[in-house]
Image (tube, rainbow, N blue to C red):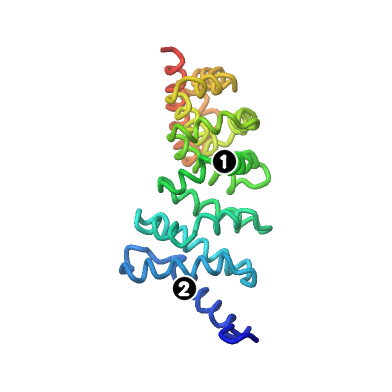
Amino acid sequence: MQKGALSNVQKKIGRLSQHTIAKILVTTNPSLLNTTQCMGSIQPLLLIVRDHDSSDFQKFEALLSITNLASFNLSTKQHIVAENGIPILSYAMFNNHEMIRQSATEVLSNLIPHPKMIEHLRNYEKLKIWVAFSSDFEDNFKCARAALGCLAMATQDQQIADALLRLENTVSMIKAVLESGNLELMHRILVITINMIEHGGDCKDVVASTGTLAFCEAYVNMYQNGQKMEELEFSDEDLKFLGKTIDLAKEIVLAYGK
């Protein structure tokens, strides 16, 4: 063993210590932590995610904890980014374990609107991954939901919207999600389309080519009077998203009527 190198036992002890932090922070409200505790937890958590020898469970709990911290405030987002978090978490999106992929996607989504995360998504090749994840809702629903949520926030940026319209699979992704029948996913894709419409020009034209306007017109006509809602017996959760999606659909119809 080289001088200064850690033994396997020492590495295992370090890994267990890092995992202990993760287990605590999964359910801890970050507002209960002082600044040193909050910021000091981020590096060891990222080390677990990056460590090839950590277990899937250790990675998963570390990612849940980082998600918790990332959603707290801009300072925690900044610290995650400063600790090389974006490339570490982006790599975790390709893990073989579905829950790790999902959690990594959720953490990165929570880094919006940090400028470095916006810069990351402006990259055409990186954005392509997020569109692919968004399309995969039948096999990986939670991961697709997180990816769509990220794009719903990120497409307010003109450069990201411009990059999105150049992707070959954007149109098919929008169509597929609209036709999925899942109100939660539809809510996210309608926000994305509204962001695109508001940018105008080619972005608005691409949305028109997806058939979104015709879909929204039919959707509003079908559900706005409330009769169909009663017939289909939606759950309270579905009704919440139904109301939101109807309002968004109306907004899209009005945007093209101007």
Mark 2 Cα shell of 10 Å, populated few (<14), some (14-19), many (≥20) = some
**Residue, x 44% and y 32% (percent of image)?**
244
**Residue, x 46% and y 73% (percent of image)?**
21
Rendered image quadrant of residue 195: top left
The location of residue 196, given as percent across then percent down, is 48, 27
Query: Between marks 2 and 1, how big is the CA–CA gap?
Result: 32 Å
Camera-side residue of 29 and 39: 39
The location of residue 253, given as percent across then percent down, is 46, 18
Camera-side residue of 222 and 82: 82
Q: How many marks?
A: 2
- Quadrant containing the C terminus is top left
Considering every residue shown, the one lying at the far top of the view is 257
Q: Secondary structure at mark 1?
A: helix
Disc 1 target residue? 127
Tag 2: amino acid: Ile
Q: What numbered label is drawn on residue 21?
A: 2
Marks 2 and 1, the one that precedes in the sequence: 2
Mark 1 Cα shell of 10 Å, populated few (<14), some (14-19), many (≥20) = some
Indicate left or right for 30 with 210 as reference: left
Of circles 2 and 1, which is in front? 1
**Residue, x 54% and y 28% (percent of image)?**
231
Q: Secondary structure at mark 2?
A: helix
- Quadrant containing the N terminus is bottom right
**Residue, x 60% and y 56% (percent of image)?**
91
In the image, residue 147 sits, relative to residue 162, either above or below, namely below
Rendered image quadrant of residue 79: bottom left
The location of residue 69, given as percent across then percent down, is 41, 60
In the image, residue 236 sits, relative to residue 61, either above or below, namely above
In the image, residue 13 sits, relative to residue 118, either above or below, namely below
Tag 1: amino acid: Leu
Q: What numbered label is drawn on residue 186?
A: none
